[in-house]
Image (cartoon, rainbow, N blue to C red):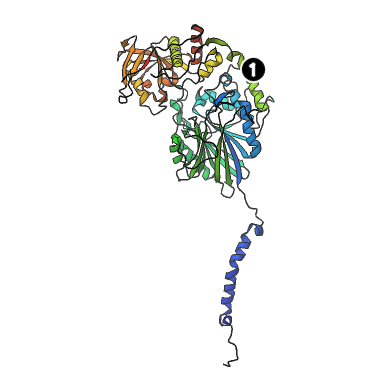
Amino acid sequence: MNKNQQSPHILARIPLVIIITLCIWSITPILIADLTSPDSLDIPVQTPVNITILAVNDFHGQITSGKMVNNSPVGGLGSMASYLMEVVNNSGEERTIIALPGDITGASTPESALLLDEPTLLFYNLFSGNASKTGQYHPISSCQVVATVGNHEFDKGITELLRKINGGNQNTTIPHLQNPYPGSATTFVSSNIVYRNTSELLLPPYTIRTIGNVSVAFIGAVTNSTPSLVTQGTVTNLTFLDEADSINQQVEILKEQGIHAFVILLHEGGTQTPYDGPTRQDVPVTGNVVGIVSRLDSDVDIVLSAHTDEFTNAFLPNAGGDPVLVTQAYSYGKGFANVSLAVDPSTDDIIWKTATIVTPYSNVPPGSNPNPDALRLLNNTLTLTNPLIKQVISSTEMNITTDRNADGESNLYDLITDSMRDSMQSDFAVLQEEAVRSDILPGSITIGTMYKLLPFGNSIVTVHMTGDQIRLLLEQQWNRTIAPTHLLQISGFNYTYDETKPISERIISITRNGSPLEPDQNYSVATIGFLAAGGDGYTVMQLSQPGVTGSLDVDVLTAYIKTLQTPLVITQNGRILRAIT
């Protein structure tokens, strides 16, 4: 080869087919990237759908203001509506869901209770765009409103619950704000209540709501301890299934339909230390809600809890170890959970969530500017109920309260149990704490006072128990798993206890007029149907023999107070004594 002759280029030594292949291989990623980009295919980028949920739990017909938080008044229909609507207006009603996780009614203020809680349900109709069926009340928004039932929804039985939901006057004797009563525009769901004989669900288990271009499923469940929390006979035809199992069953059904965004309305709860601001990581929560959430399907992202009337704003792990946002906003209109979430339209998954617990103060904006439509509903309600509520039956110059003295005795419970025993002409009376929900303070005592004290409308009943069964009942105060702080208050006998002794051995003596109770002798005991059925874990009551049914507790107490001196004076007589050790 001539030394001045150049060597051929390296590519000249490679077959042409290989060169072409290498060139195609090198530009393929660029071509693919360009072809699959949104611009090249003209496919818009799908941004997450932002949704707001406003959860009001355990409202209990609290339509008037009067509750206090941080020494300031809270609640009332007008103020609550203003707070809710402020969020609705900011978030957009088409992107806002109002959720009610049970105990919307029951244990209510007399203003709502005297009208069978129709005012409360009509209030939430205002938000659904459905309030003006008769032209009387105008909707203030067109949000979607969903709910589950709590144990107190069963206070007056299944028939009355379904009437409240579906509408109609039926056999009611009250005046109706809308006549006929139109029913609730709220969608009620529950996955774990079935008829005992047929296993048919009492209510639909879920509802699917489409917001933007995503679907969110709301599944309901109530505490399965409901039968022990309601008056005897009100739910005998129903079975309350395990909460987590029932929810998961519906989740599986919905996932087959392509649903992956799940919000649970759970009327069961827990407790934690309250704080202000958005949801924090790693905050401890105790109570039944923790175990239920830990068993929920890994697709479940949000649980709106209730029942314990406490604060909850935390992330708890589900069965897959993924964080579930769990909220609860006290009770009686003292708060609501403002939940923000985002759903990915491509997967229909909730990809982000947080919450704050809001206190609806009525003395500062927006609460100090009550919503006029909600206020009109309240004023119309008061027009019907005020004449009865303000009727004076007595007066007092002392505090008659549920507070226990050093021995564990309350002068208000002394008064109420005495009224029960007097009404039924029984040997004794027993009543569990928390059955009374207010106090009697110095001043006039009105019918309204009576309803605040005894909001449940329980019938007084008698049962027959032996002296030995009464001793076992008193011992059970310290060895129950349900409502362990709800101890017993009594009338007609005395007992002494020693908390230093082992559980089930703490009752030292039980006497009647100074003489010990006979273990085998039968005694008549006045109580309420709830306790007679073993409520609050007092299962010894189930050993008793049924007697007769009397009048409602509120009527009994009202009549009894009218027979007593004015001003009313209650002197405690040491019917409960702590042993001196």
Q: Compared to 159, does 559 lie above or below?
A: above
Residue 549, above or below 480:
above
Q: Give the image location of residue 461, x and y in percent.
A: 43, 15
Residue 17 image position (x, y, % from top left): 58, 77
Q: Name the image quarter holding the C terminus.
A: top left
Location of residue 228 in the rendering, given as x and y in whole percent from the top left corner: 43, 26
Local packing at callout 1 (Cα closer than 10 Å; few below 14, some 14-19, many 20+) is few
For numbered disc 1, what is the local secondary structure?
A: helix
Task: State the residue lying farthest toward the bottom.
Answer: 2
Q: Who is closer to the viewer here, 254 or 215?
A: 215
Single out the residue that lies furthest toward the right: 135
Q: Would residue 92 be seen by someone viewing this image from the given angle?
A: no
Left or right, 82 with respect to 445, comes to: right
Query: Label 1 belongs to which residue?
Result: 383
> Is residue 249 rendered to the left or right of residue 64?
left
Give the quadrant of residue 88: top right
**Residue flagged by tag 1: what amino acid is it?**
Thr
Q: Position of residue 567 (x, y in %)?
A: 51, 8
Foreground pick, 177 / 391: 391
Above or below, comparing residue 286 to residue 404 in the picture:
below
Q: Could you tell whether 220 is left or right of 122 in the image?
A: left
- Specify the quadrant that holds the N terminus: bottom right
User: Residue 14: in sight, yes or no?
Assistant: yes
At 68% from the left edge and 24% from the top edge, which residue is drawn?
136
